[in-house]
Image (spheres, rainbow, N blue to C red):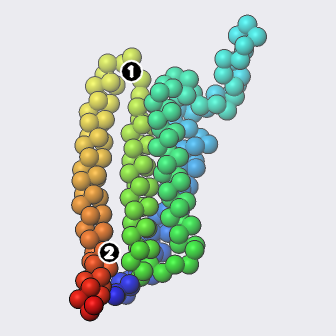
Amino acid sequence: MAKEIDDPMAERKADALLIAASVIAAMNYQAGISPPGGAYQDTRVVNGTIEYQAGQSIAAYVSPYEYRRFSIANTISFSFSMTTMFLFLSGLSLKRRIFSFLLTASMFATITATTWSYKLAMEATTPAHDDQLKIGWDNISRLVTGALYMWFVVAGITIVIFTVKLLKPLVTACRQETHKT
């Protein structure tokens, strides 16, 4: 049963994936501590009630629904990029089919969530009261949404093909065992 992939470029691919995961994790971390739209520089108290505090996200107050969705997507992307780095640091070989599959799935989730958080950050920071900006944003939103759908189709097909390639040796080995008995 073939458990390893014969790929002389495996080490270079591993290095590239580790760098990509690291860069994406850094981007997500930065977006988390320096949110889209910025942060309040002061604390505002009205009638003894704190309306907002210095350091808190402006978008969280101006567009709470969009900001919450952005935060979820950003956290998912950050978590999967950290998972990808952890898998690399675990010392498993990229030539192992299952490890290669886990890395592919993790990077798929990372890139998908990063693209989604980009779209949501744009939604959270684009003024809805300006008709000209809204028209432009609607076009960009449709473009990014279309790109996400296309990404899901391409990545989905890729994952199906990769899964079939991963399972083929297992099925072949099971069939051979069945025919031996």
Question: Where residue 170 appears, x then y in whole percent?
Answer: 32, 79
Q: Is residue 18 left or right of residue 137?
A: right
**In this orientation, which residue lies closer to the viewer: 90 or 85?**
90
Give the label on residue 107, or none: none
Q: Which of the 4 quarters of the picture holds residue 58?
A: top right
Asked if residue 117 can be seen in this view, the reply is yes
Residue holding disc 2: 166
As measured in the structure, the alpha-carbon distance from the residue carrying label 2 to the one carrying label 1 is 47 Å
In the rendered image, the quadrant that contains the C terminus is: bottom left
Q: Tell me which residue sits at (25%, 68%) in the image.
A: 161
Identity of the residue drawn at 41% across and 74% down:
98
Secondary structure under the numbered disc 2 in the rendered image: helix
Specify the amino acid type for callout 2: Leu
At horizontal 53% and vertical 52% (from top left) the residue drawn is 78
Residue for badge 1: 128
Residue 2 image point, x, y percent: 34, 87
Query: Counting residues from the N terminus, which is met first, the one under dot 2 or under dot 1?
Result: 1
Up/down of 113 relative to 159, above or below:
above
> Amino acid under label 1?
Ala
